Image (cartoon, grey):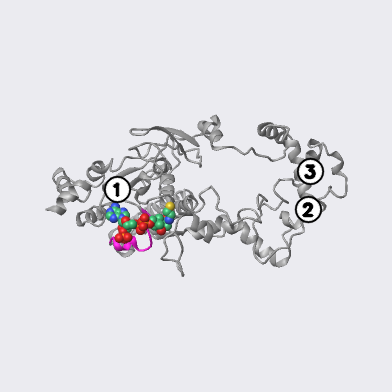
Amino acid sequence: MARRAKVKAKARTAVKKSAGKKVMKLKAKKAAAKAAANGLPRPSAKPWGQAGKALDGVRILDFTHVQSGPTCTQLLAYMGADVIKVERPGVGDITRGQLRDVKGADSLYFTMLNGSKRSITIDSKHPKGKEILDRLIKHCDVLVENFAPGALDRMGLTWEHIHKTNPRMIVASVKGFGPGPYEDCKVYENVAQCAGGAASTTGFRDGPPLVTGAQIGDSGTGLHLAFGIVSALYQRIRTGRGQRVLCAMQDGVLNLARVKLRDQQRLAHGPLREYSQFGEGIPFGDAVPRAGNDSGGGQPGRFITQAPVWGPICDLIGKPEWKTDPDYAKPPARLPRLKHIFTTIEQWTMTKTKFQVMDICNKLDIPVGPILSMKEIAEEPSLRKTGTVVEVDHPTRGKYLTVGNPVKMSDSVTEVKRSPLLGEHTDEILSKVLGYSAAEMAAIKASGAITAPEKTKAEAA
Ligand code: COA
């Protein structure tokens, strides 16, 4: 009896052990599968481009104005984020009225920087307005702003307050300068181009410093900020918490002008041989000079006449003898003769249209590009086809052109929508995003926190 019981007990233990082993094996298998999948969802089975947009589900509290901040949030909107632009009741973003071309309609300055966004009006200094903003902070992932230094704090929206209200919130700012002697200064485009090193290195040697037409201070910094925000969103997946993201316009411009800081350091080791002034025998000072249209890419002068294409260029311009002439055959020999060489090339290009030059040279692998006017760009069919230039319709100004998403993605389709009218989505956001009841909305309206005329009434009361 005792023996039989012992055998039974042993058998039970064996069964238990093998069951336990099976469970362990299953768990290990699951863990392995999870590790192999990196804990991420399985790839979507939906067709490419139909599985939503890259930033679907990300909500942005857009406190930006003028150009730098709006460039950033418009790009995020193009990528699929729900961008809620907060504007001052009755006034809105100052650019709505700047450079107006159509009476009574939002300017192109505004419409081309605020597409695909929603607009809500809130007086951020009104107690009820502050309440709405706090609720928005709880419902959003990122707050983006480019106010003057200290303005956000003066509204009571300090980092500490925001982080306490929503620890996952990312707070992204454009400022003119980073911490340092100029951190309290207000900054616009030209100031940034000057302080970031672009202006001192742009223009002709014997002329004044110039700013470029491309808005590298404003739009360039907005672009940098968008990169910071997306990185912070990615890090938040791991850490579960938001962080502050700062992009100073001076830093953004310098990042784009980095080849000139490269040349500044090279200057310590001798003259910059690829600059036209070297070939012309003009001595260098102790700072990188302006170099006209000389390229920063390292090839001599303003034309790209790199060694591999020198032969075909000589044939094209009717100077086949330059291929073997010791004064022209090798790049160092050409340096003192750049002006003459470029003039000869131009004598040939002047016999053709810019598009003919493009056709002829590209067939020979010689990189060239036509100088396109904005008119030509606006009318270029291929840019319309790719969505880089988009026509949208606006209720008060009619059709206008805007620049679509310059970044093309195979699984995230960009939808470029017209810019919102001032406060166009106030009711929709209060009720559908923030969940205010009809009675609460009536109270908000009466308080003067979201509408300029009501504010006058409330103040008068
Ligand atoms: N409700 C109530 N007040 C609001 C508001 C709202 N919805 N939105 C803005 N304001 C207030 C701000 O709180 C601020 O008030 P305060 O000075 O009493 O604190 C005021 O409007 C003006 O904001 P500010 O940013 O100082 O605007 P500005 O026109 O004086 O300066 C810039 C404009 C661009 C120079 C400045 O914002 C700046 O330097 N920004 C950072 C750098 C930048 O982005 N520059 C490039 C812009 S393209």
Q: Residues within 10 Å of mark 2 (few under 14, many from 20)?
A: many
Spatial CA span between label 3 and label 2: 14 Å
Residue that appears at 46% across and 60% down: 248
Q: Horizontal placement of 131 versus 12: left or right? A: left
Q: Nearer the viewer, residue 101 or 159?
A: 101
* Residue 439 appears anywhere in the view: yes
What percent of the width, then of the height, locates residue 454? 18, 47
Asked if disc 1 and disc 2 are in contact, CB closer than 8 Å, the reply is: no
Q: Is residue 151 magenta?
A: yes
Q: Nearer the viewer, mark 3 or mark 2?
A: 2
What percent of the width, then of the height, locates residue 88? 28, 50
In terms of image quarters, where does ligand 1 lie? Answer: bottom left
Residue 286 quadrant: bottom right
Q: Earlier in the sequence, mark 3 or mark 2?
A: 3
Q: Tell me the kind of residue under disc 3.
A: Trp
Residue that appears at 19% across and 50% down: 455
Give the SS element for disc 3: helix
Give the SS element for disc 1: loop
Residue underneath mark 1: 91
Q: Earlier in the sequence, mark 3 or mark 1?
A: 1
What percent of the width, then of the height, locates residue 357? 70, 34
Q: Tell me the kind of residue under disc 1.
A: Val
Q: Horizontal placement of 92 versus 403: left or right? A: left
Q: Earlier in the sequence, mark 1 or mark 2?
A: 1
Image mark for residue 335: 2
Residue underneath mark 3: 310
Residue 201 quadrant: bottom right
Q: Nearer the viewer, residue 284 or 377?
A: 284
Q: Horizontal placement of 10 versus 216: left or right? A: left
Q: Tell me the kind of residue under disc 2.
A: Leu
Task: Tell me which segment is drawn in magenta.
Answer: 143-155
Q: Nearer the viewer, residue 335 or 381?
A: 335
